[in-house]
Amino acid sequence: MKLTVKAKKSYDVYIEDKILSLKDYLDVSKRYFIVIDNNLPKAKLELFKEELENSSFYFLEAIEENKNLITVEVILEELLNQNFTKSDYLIGLGGGIIGDIAAFVASIYKRGMNYIYFPTSTTAMVDVAIGGKNGVNLLKNKNIIGTITPPAKVIVDLSFLESLPEKHYHNGLVEAIKMGMLFDKELFAIFEKKDFKNIKEIVVKSLKIKKQVVEQDEEDQDYRNLLNFGHTLAHAIEASSDYRISHGEAVAGGLLVDTINQDLKLKLETIFKALKIKYNYKLNLDKIKPYLYSDKKMKDEKIKIILLEDLEKYTIKYYSVDQYLELLKGA
């Protein structure tokens, strides 16, 4: 199926069970520089090697420690040394980390080159695929440097998930759970029923929500901020743990803290337990504090927190860092 995101530069998102030929989606005569998660099974890369003959492959370990300006500079130098132009294409083939790095590079190389994304993880498929956000970390602060630049195209091949370890598969579903809590009771009900393998419906519902949000507020000035639900705390948890706590685990903790409906909290805990997602780690508030101060949405010394009162019912509060830390003490 195909979704069209009507943004400042509209683009198509294809969602397929398994892609048998890239020729149905790409002009194979073009030149491509492909940034690839080096953990992807080699068998999944054969199609790219066979059909995109005029291509360069750059393999990268997809860890947060590599999501920095050093990695960006290395890739930029590769593009320049191989004489890639603005009219050539950069492809990101991987999960959220690869997507962030590759999209950022494409957005700044020669002031912008064509970018195509093939998300390969649940997180990337349900969230990163739409929206154009990209970024890298600075001094461990998550996604501090980045742009909002629409891709030329996104191609979701669900068969990539077949080789994804269960832990990563489940962690990525947390972003879809967030979408359901904010905007779609039916999506949340899939998780209440523990229908975790119903991935196509989960991906399609999540991306339809993300599309609707991005079309209303692509530049993340107001309405799109709602997608930050649970993430202000989550990013601080990730960074303060030196990224030993995964993104999915951190977001799970953030969603629980920012959900103020106790019955809904219990439902969330039940879902996270079924998914074997760790969420009840002890918060070190002293370590978290500096990362809250560097939150991207800090304004007038206040952080914007989305609190969920019930499914599809939220309120927005503004707290100083110290006020929010006081709330966390009781969480």
Image (cartoon, grey):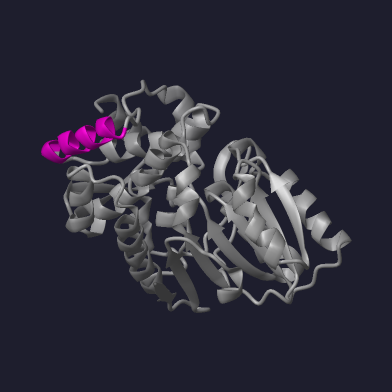
* Percent of width and height locating residue 213: 35, 67
Above or below, 76 relative to 244: below
Q: Position of residue 30 (x, y in %)?
A: 73, 75
**Image quadrant for the N terminus?**
bottom left
Relative horizontal placement of residue 287, taking residue 305 as reference (left or right): right
80 left or right of 329? right
Question: Residue 267: where, in percent of width, then height?
Answer: 17, 38
Between residues 268 and 32, which one lies in front from this camera angle?
32
Q: Quadrant of residue 279?
A: top left
Query: Within the magenta stretch, is there residue 265?
Result: yes
The residue that appears at 36% across and 55% down in the rendered structure is 227
The answer to which of 59 and 48 lies nearer the viewer is 48
Please report the bounds of the magenta region as a residue range: 262-275
Q: Quadrant of the C terminus?
A: top left
Relative height, residue 106 to residue 59 (above, below) = below
Q: At x 46% / y 76%, what residue is drawn?
A: 7
> Taking 30 as reference, is 240 above or below it?
above
The front one of 175 and 222 is 175
Instruction: Write the residue at 26% across / 30% down.
Output: 273
